[in-house]
Image: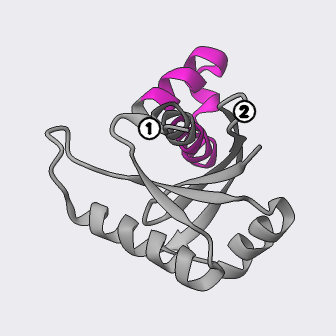
Amino acid sequence: MSTVIAFDFGTSSIGAAIGQDITKTARPLCAFKARDGKPNWQEIEKVLREWEPDYLVVGLPLNMDGTEQELTQRARKFANRLHGRFGFQVQLQDERLSTVEAKSQLFANGGFRALKKSRVDASSAVIILESWFNNIVK
């Protein structure tokens, strides 16, 4: 069994989710505040030490036609920093429409009050991770 933490990168908030590859399911962990895409690395380190994941996944924001945007490069840089700082293997996963899907699910279960930014970001990370589980070949 492998434990995996996924991140939904954003410039002001970075959602996180945890899951495992046997059931290919994930659950929201938290959202880290960020300043211009830079998180408090000590908070991320604390979560990584607590959960000791086998892999990390970072959502890759692409345009609907699959082309890259400015945020795509920033997400890649975040993934590279995770690997460089903590030594984890980091995979990238297409995250197109993950935020839309997360908002839809949260709204269906709790209305507008459920649409807090931190909940949306962590739920987006769940969608990214479950999508990654469904796309990996083992």
Residue positioned 70% across, 59% down in the render: 54
- Magenta range is 101-127
Q: If the image is split into quadrants, where does the C terminus sit?
A: top right
Residue positioned 55% across, 47% down in the render: 121
Q: Position of residue 64 (x, y in %)?
A: 19, 38
Measured Cα–Cα span from mark 1 to mark 2: 25 Å
The residue wearing badge 2 is: 22
Would you place residue 87 above or below residue 91 in this image?
below
Q: Residue furthest front?
A: 138
The residue wearing badge 1 is: 99
Indicate left or right for 121 with 42 as reference. left
Residue 105 within the magenta-colored segment of the rendering: yes
Secondary structure beneath label 1: helix
**At label 2, which amino acid type do we have?**
Ile
- Nearer the observer, 41 or 36: 41
Q: Position of residue 75 (x, y in %)?
A: 39, 65
Which callout, 1 or 2, points to the residue nearer the camera?
A: 2
**At label 1, which amino acid type do we have?**
Thr
Residue 72 within the magenta-colored segment of the rendering: no
Q: Position of residue 91 (x, y in %)?
A: 48, 58
Residue 130 falls in which quadrant of the image? Answer: top right
Of the numbered discs in the image, which one, if any, rests on residue 62? none
